[in-house]
Image (tube, helix red, strand yellow):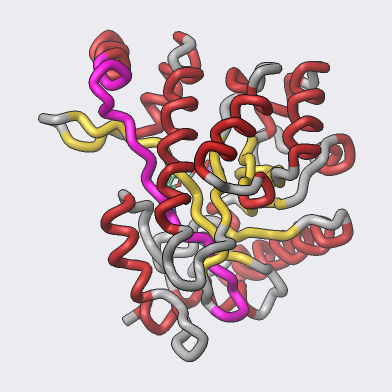
Amino acid sequence: KRLETEQFIDQGLRNDWFTAHLQPIVSLSDGRVAGFEALMRLRHPERGILPPAEIIGIAEENGAIGRIGDCILSKAIADLAVISKLDGLADIYLAVNFSPLQFEPALPARLAALLLENGITPARIVVEITEAVLMLDSPVVRDVLDALSELGCRIALDDFGTGYSSLSYLNRFPVDIVKIDQSFTRSLSSDQPDVRRKSRMLVEGIRTISHQMGCAVVAEGIETTEQWDILQTMDVEFGQGYLLSRPLPLDALLEKLDEFATPDMPARRAAAS
Ligand code: G
Ligand code: MN
């Protein structure tokens, strides 16, 4: 099974099977699309889309993640350039996930060059990292983060509140955005009143600390209108999840964007109907 996955990765890189799917990130106050997160997908010609978690796990072990990351980064930026031409979407942002192994000294310059080629300002790029990057706590990681930040990119801390994610990271690294892990969003609508109440307190607590540290907040994994409604009352700026849209390839996304907010049509009604 593992060998097979390694072969798929190899073939994928050679035959251009890797692609970026894009998932809208929506402003909770008015339902407008604020940005997109690029998510890696391997589209096998016979097997279809392969589960990304397994591919990323193996690619991180055998080092292929660097080349996959480069490929996704350049495709997603090219997609952003296309989306930017649409009415009202000229300032929309792109969030890209980075694995710890991609944090090498050459990254900021390579990203800057890609952005220049595609006519995109660095302020429109969000670099998503997990605590796995910060846990390395190496001078290289620090320097790369600082360089990305100086370039004008924003830094988002992904899956916040789970794993080894530590509040002290907010203190020690230049974080601009906190993404509340989807498990918290899910528990907001748990059938157990106690779990609901406590998750609410956790989300409100994370939000308050994030805001006090000057970070914007994104709630991940919104799947139901109930979760959306709860989050809307909580002063969380942004939301993302299947309720609004699954991650989609560029052509499907361009069609779907019609459903999203215009000034007189909030996105949620469109998404929920
Ligand atoms: O670690 P990160 O948060 O970047 O991972 C996002 C993953 O979650 C992606 O694989 C994406 O497809 C998936 N995802 C996005 N929205 C939802 C959602 O509403 N529900 C669930 N279960 N998964 C989601
Ligand atoms: Mn992410």
Identify the residue at horizontal 41%, vertical 31% (top origin).
Answer: 53
The picture places residue 123, in percent across and down from the top left corner, at 68, 50
Whether the magenta-drawn stretch holds residue 24 is answered as: yes
In the image, farthest residue toward the bottom: 264
Q: Residue, x 54% and y 53% (percent of image)? A: 182
Residue 240, horizontal then vertical, whole percent: 51, 60
Q: Residue at x 14, y 30 (%)?
A: 45
Q: To which quarter of the image does residue 17 belong? A: top left
Return the residue nearer the eye: 199 or 4: 4
Q: Is residue 1 visible?
A: no
User: Relative to 63, is 254 on the left or the right?
Assistant: left
In front here: 106 or 101?
Answer: 106
Quadrant including the N terminus:
top left
128 within the magenta span? no
Q: Position of residue 189 (x, y in %)?
A: 52, 69
The relative height of residue 135 versus residue 259 in the rendered view (above or below) is above
Q: x%, y% of residue 99?
A: 57, 26
The quarter of the rendered structure image containing the C terminus is bottom left
Q: Which residue appears at 68% of the width and 28% of the height?
A: 108
Looking at the picture, tell me which residue is in the foreground, 28 or 228: 28
Q: Is residue 272 above or below residue 77?
A: below
**Looking at the image, can residue 73 be seen?**
yes
| Quadrant in the rendering for residue 202 | bottom right
Q: How many dots with numbers?
A: 0
Report the magenta residues as a range. Answer: 11-30
Residue 161 placement, left or right of 44: right
Residue 54: name its quadrant.
top left
In the rendered image, the vertical position of residue 134 relative to residue 216, given as above or below = above
